[in-house]
Image (cartoon, helix red, strand yellow):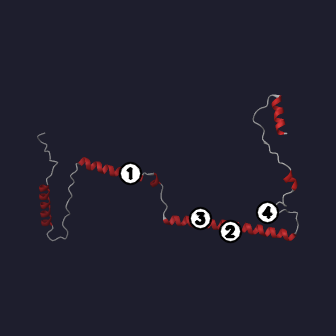
Amino acid sequence: MDGYKFTRSFVSEAELEEQRAQCSKAWEKAHAGDAEPQQEQVYDSRTLYERLQENKRLKQEQYEEAKRPSNLVPKLKDDELGFLKKLDEQEDTEEGEKMRQEWEALAQFRREVREVGQSAIAIPTLAPTADDVPKKFVETPVLAYSITKPTVKRSRPIDLLQGAVRLA
């Protein structure tokens, strides 16, 4: 322990002023005709441990910010967004043109059928009227039943008869 010299952790304001004066004199001596004086070093009174902990905390915050899920997905740039919008507009115009051509072809077909004047081809309308529906379909009730076979295996005769009665 005799060879080790401990430094004080407390530095008085007078000692700091003395160090500043020595630094400024040394700088003036070295740079007698230069333009800018040396900037004064800011004294940090925190311990080394506190400064290192602060640096560690800042680096951890930067790491967490970089690894957030919203930062992992690459953001689209303005030129990429413009390109995607242009593609979307092209698809919309192509789809609209296709629909227009289909409607024109359908209208042309209906005109030709009317010109021929034959009622052999029935043209369905978008909203059927009461005159279009045959009366036999309106008056007869529709029975609905399952077409698929039941999954339960019928082993008794009474079960078979009950299934036949339900379907009939």
* Residue type (three-letter) at the residue carrying disc 2: Glu
Earlier-in-chain disc, 4 versus 1: 1
Q: Is disc 2 placed on a helix, strand or loop?
A: helix
Nearer the viewer's eye, disc 2 or disc 4? 4
Q: Is disc 4 placed on a helix, strand or loop?
A: loop
Residue shown at 77% from the left, 37% from the top = 150
Q: Are marks 3 and 1 in contact (CB under 8 Å)?
A: no
Nearer the viewer's eye, disc 4 or disc 1? 4
Q: Is disc 1 placed on a helix, strand or loop?
A: helix
* Residue that mark 4 sits on: 125
The residues bearing labels 3 and 1 have C-alpha atoms spaced at a distance of: 37 Å
* Residue that mark 1 sits on: 63
Earlier-in-chain disc, 4 versus 3: 3
Vertical side of 18 occupied by 143: above or below: above
* Residue that mark 3 sits on: 88
* Residue that mark 2 sits on: 97
The residues bearing labels 3 and 2 have C-alpha atoms spaced at a distance of: 14 Å
* Residue type (three-letter) at the residue carrying disc 1: Tyr
Is residue 93 rendered to the left or right of residue 26?
right
Crowd around label 1: few <14 · some 14–19 · many ≥20 (10 Å): few
Crowd around label 4: few <14 · some 14–19 · many ≥20 (10 Å): few
Counting from the top left corner in percent of width and height, residue 87 is at 58, 65
Is residue 74 rendered to the left or right of residue 34?
right
Counting from the top left corner in percent of width and height, residue 135 is at 87, 55
Earlier-in-chain disc, 2 versus 4: 2
Nearer the viewer's eye, disc 4 or disc 3? 4
Residue shown at 32% from the left, 49% from the top = 56
The residues bearing labels 4 and 3 have C-alpha atoms spaced at a distance of: 33 Å
